[in-house]
Amino acid sequence: MEKEFLDRVEDNAAVQVWSERTQQEKGDSLTEGYASELWDFTHISVTQNDLQELRDIWNSWNGEVKQLFYCNYGDLPYLLDVKVDKYLFRALAQFWNPAYSCFTFGGVDLVPTMEEYMALLNCPKIQADRAYSRPVNVPPFLKKLMNITGMSEQWVAARIKQKGDSKCIPWRNLRDLIFAHPDSKKRVDVFALSLYGLIIFPKALGHIDEAVSDLFDRLDKSTTPVPTILAETFRSLNACQRAGEGRFIGCAQLLLAWFHSHFWKVEKVFYLVFSKDYSPLRELVATLRRDDISEEKCGDFDWVPLAGIWGAIGYAPLMVLRQYRSRQFIPVTQGLAQYEFSYKDDNYKRRVRNISDAWNQTRRMKGFTTGPMTTPKYE
């Protein structure tokens, strides 16, 4: 037992040495002596779409149709019943640190990982080795909607609207199509598109944004939406935190579900701490942890670029160590900020191509952190 503990301490020390040496060699994009500067209060809005009609449609379907949905799109319908506590969300947003793209609670850093979101979505068709990247030449919105809905060009063209700086299709048009479409598979597809547009990426209230259809159109090719969901979650939190205000346009339901998942023991501890049969040390020792973390396993990869539907961002994998009961090391941030950009910026296509090439070369994401849910690195 003592040897196993010492081995883990030694591995932890090796990672710390590697992290500190890498910081010295590559430098840091943050100024020396930087301390997280969070706003006293971020005026963030979590205004949501009215989801009652989506709930009614889902509840009206029989078990066979629901099973068809689960097989293709996972547990998305459960998000319809996740209550968004705006006060909890606003409190959570106060602790978002845009410099490292993580939540900083005093000495504890927390950040959603891809594996955690994949576990929450629970979609058997999602593959971890196929990540979304925005194509250099985006297919026309009209063509994508025709492919997804199975409707004619005339039908689709008559329903495309302009909302702000992007094209959209109103939810009411998709709602009517769900009721009227003769193909049950297409009804499920349109319903899923609506969930993505109204819950996962709720940019224009009551509408499904054109960018959502590009990601959705590739889900049947086993492309995982998780890095994209994380990217837009991080980008929206960054924008709100830096401005001190704004509306969150990521998936608030999924983020809150993730946050609650890290506090599942709260209810358990309430009565176990008063039980003479409960031993916190025994539970700690019995907790399975990776004990093979080393410099070789960490490699020289410091942060992960994530491509969203409206822009891109990076986050540092070392941030997830502490939430899996391992020692926290401040990661190298040199280069981290350069991968936060909007698809409307100059030369964004070249930067998107760089992200896409990196993902395509790996084809398979492997973990290097502790615990049952890890975060990816490149070989």
Image: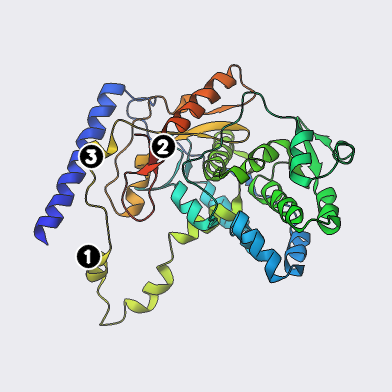
- Can you say which quadrant of the picture contains the C terminus? top left
Instruction: Decide if residue 3 is on the left or right side of residue 345.
Output: left
Helix, strand or loop at label 1? It is helix
Mark identifier at residue 15: 3
Q: Is residue 368 visible?
A: yes
Please say if 304 is above or below 26: below
Residue 90 is situated, as x and y percent measured from the top left of the image, at 57, 51
Helix, strand or loop at label 3? It is helix
Q: CA distance from mark 1 to mark 3?
A: 22 Å
Amino acid on which disc 3 is placed: Val
Please say if 88 is above or below 292: below
| 1 vs 2, front mark | 1
| 2 vs 3, front mark | 3
Q: CA distance from mark 2 to mark 3?
A: 23 Å
Residue 183 is situated, as x and y percent measured from the top left of the image, at 79, 56
Q: Residues within 10 Å of mark 2 (few under 14, many from 20)?
A: few
Mark identifier at residue 210: none
**Quick one: label 2 or label 3, which is nearer the N terminus?**
3
**Quick one: label 1 or label 3, which is nearer the N terminus?**
3
| Residue situated furthest left in the rendering | 3
**Quick one: label 1 or label 2, which is nearer the N terminus?**
2
Residue hosting label 1: 285
Residues marked 1 and 3 touching at CB (< 8 Å): no
The front one of 86 and 111 is 111
Please say if 222 is above or below 157: below
Amino acid on which disc 1 is placed: Val
Residue 7 is situated, as x and y percent measured from the top left of the image, at 14, 50
Q: CA distance from mark 1 to mark 2?
A: 33 Å
Mark identifier at residue 36: 2
